[in-house]
Image (tube, rainbow, N blue to C red):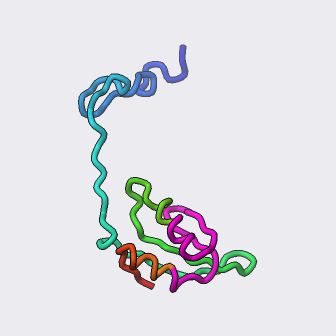
Amino acid sequence: MHLFEGTQWDRPPHCPQCEQLEADCTCPPPEVEIVPPGKQTAKLAVEKRRKGKVVTVIRNLKDEADHLPQLLKKVKSACGAGGTLKEGAIEIQGRQLDRVREVLTTLGYRTQG
């Protein structure tokens, strides 16, 4: 007897649209609605971390089609500083508020903060 025998996890996954096995499904992948930068408002803030380190944080941007890593790369190179993605927010090392605001407005985003 298997651990999940007779439960929903015992059966192979099926496509919700055509009800075929996922391996045999020929349905096109669902379309991802991408919100243009002009309709997104980035909330900017400067925060203090442990040991007195200062970071500039960009929040409230939607991560459709994994565009946040690309945006992080552009902002990091424009600021000449390191940075990371944490919980859907972009963190740039240092007090870079003016540079980040400038980069985001040139890319078409609205900024707040």
Name the residue at 60% across, 83% down.
95
Residue 4, x across and y down, in percent: 50, 23
**Viewer-closest of 17 and 94:** 94
**Viewer-closest of 51 and 34:** 34
Q: Is residue 83 left or right of residue 16?
A: right
Residue 12 vs 37, above or below: the answer is above
Query: Quarter-wise, where is residue 110 in the image?
Result: bottom left
**Viewer-closest of 105 and 58:** 105
Name the residue at 63% across, 73% down.
81
Quarter holding the N terminus is: top right
Name the residue at 41% across, 59% down.
63
Residue 88 belongs to the span the image colors magenta: yes
Residue 93 vs 62, above or below: the answer is below
Residue 38, x across and y down, in percent: 30, 73
* Residue found at the far left of this picture: 18
Residue 78 vs 31, above or below: the answer is below
Residue 6 belongs to the span the image colors magenta: no
Residue numbers of the magenta segment:
73-99
Query: Quarter-wise, where is residue 57 in the image?
Result: bottom right
Residue 13, x across and y down, in percent: 39, 27
Report the label total.
0
Residue 101 vs 23, above or below: the answer is below
Query: Quarter-wise, where is residue 91 in the image?
Result: bottom right
Residue 89, x across and y down, in percent: 51, 67
Q: Is residue 22 left or right of residue 94?
A: left
Q: Is residue 86 left or right of residue 67?
A: right
